[in-house]
Image (tube, coloured by chain):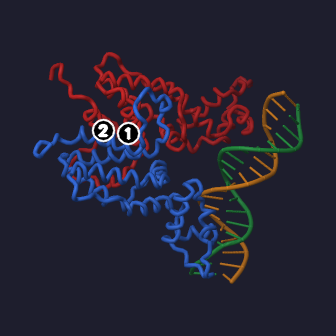
Chain colours: A red, B blue, C orange, D green
Amino acid sequence: MVTPGGTRPKLSRELIVTKARAIADASGLDALTLRELAHALGTGQASLYRHIADRRELLGLLVDDVALEFPTADPELPPRERLIRVWLDLHAFLSAHEWVAKVIAEGEYVSRNAAPFARHQLTCLTDAGVHPDEAMRAYRALYNLLLGFLLNKHPMGHHLDPAGAAPSTEDEEFRWAVTRFLDGLLPAEHPDAP
Amino acid sequence: MVTPGGTRPKLSRELIVTKARAIADASGLDALTLRELAHALGTGQASLYRHIADRRELLGLLVDDVALEFPTADPELPPRERLIRVWLDLHAFLSAHEWVAKVIAEGEYVSRNAAPFARHQLTCLTDAGVHPDEAMRAYRALYNLLLGFLLNKHPMGHHLDPAGAAPSTEDEEFRWAVTRFLDGLLPAEHPDAP
DNA sequence: ACCTGAACACCGTTCAAGT
DNA sequence: ACCTGAACACCGTTCAAGT
């Protein structure tokens, strides 16, 4: 995929990450091979290794790149609704890039760019009434819950789906689970109207 | 790995699954290659294909085999404690076989042998006061929460671990999360003693 | 000095040749 | 008829040869 003009931009980490994301988003994680990536960039496989250490590092860079686009909380909303909204937004965002959850699950990455999101969520949690000592636990629980929903497309025993109970979208199910968790976590509201 | 006696038992699906589980438990999912598996069974790779369709099917059989050993709830305990105990037991069990969560996350399996566990959990949930229409949602939420804890060894932003807050084991963290979820899910207890 | 085609050591899967 | 060594089409990674 050389630029129509004929000249092709010099290879760089950023160019590699951008193209790799495009492939992963369009065709999934399995389709993102170093051969395919090199071909799409109009270069040889070996050239990639001048900019990245190995595939593992590339996947880490991809997650870090995605983390820059994590949603931010709406300050207009009251603390509790703010929490629900931002986690639903993150669920929707990562559902649109399903390879991200897989990369996180199989590797052991610590995304630098996700730190601001995490930090902001901790203050949202304490704003909502969570004791500071518990905020990190609560954040991790919400994050793990999200990851489970993203990864587990066919929950075990799903097929026995009993009697009535109207079917619901994955998004609704996640909202329900988050709400139940927050019900158990947050102090009952007392100051304002019903 | 031929039996010392010299004769080797005839190859079968069960033999393949047993040996494959041993390899996965001992050396992880990546070490479970069809070459290694065939070698450990003292046969050729092609012979495996007389008993399994492909690697995907083999992994499904492994999960199904593990599902037979899922914990059962202790009927002595009151409903709420029964739920907590069984999910902690399942967490401990699957932590000891970390490849299981990875297989579930990457494939799209529906384990037949997990159905009794799921069914039993639904009755435990309704026993604890959950409306039958919500029991399946609650089961899936708990299961997804578990999966997230099993897969996410380095939660994003984990490295910023703030101030005080005594460090806790993953087991304690999972217990805390399950407890908060059940607090939000189950009706407040009123009939019996404090 | 920098880049990269070709090779290397794997992988899952298939097939044709052996019994 | 049943089994399986050897080959095939991939993969990530390396290296020696090109500019």
**Label 1 amino acid?**
Leu
Residue A177 got which mark? Answer: 2
Which residue shows up at 43% across the image and 63% down it?
Answer: B65
Q: Residue furthest top?
A: A76
Which residue shows up at 34% across the image and 44% down it?
Answer: B175
Helix, strand or loop under label 1: helix
Residue that badge 1 annotates:
A145
**Picture quarter with the N terminus of chain A:** top right
**Residue B1 image position (x, y, % from top left):** 62, 71
In this view, A108 is above or below B51: above
In this view, B34 is above or below B131: below
Left or right: A97 as drawn, with respect to A161: right
- Asked whether residue A88 is in view, the answer is no
Helix, strand or loop under label 2: helix
| C-alpha span from label 2 to label 1 | 8 Å
Q: Quadrant of residue A41?
A: top right
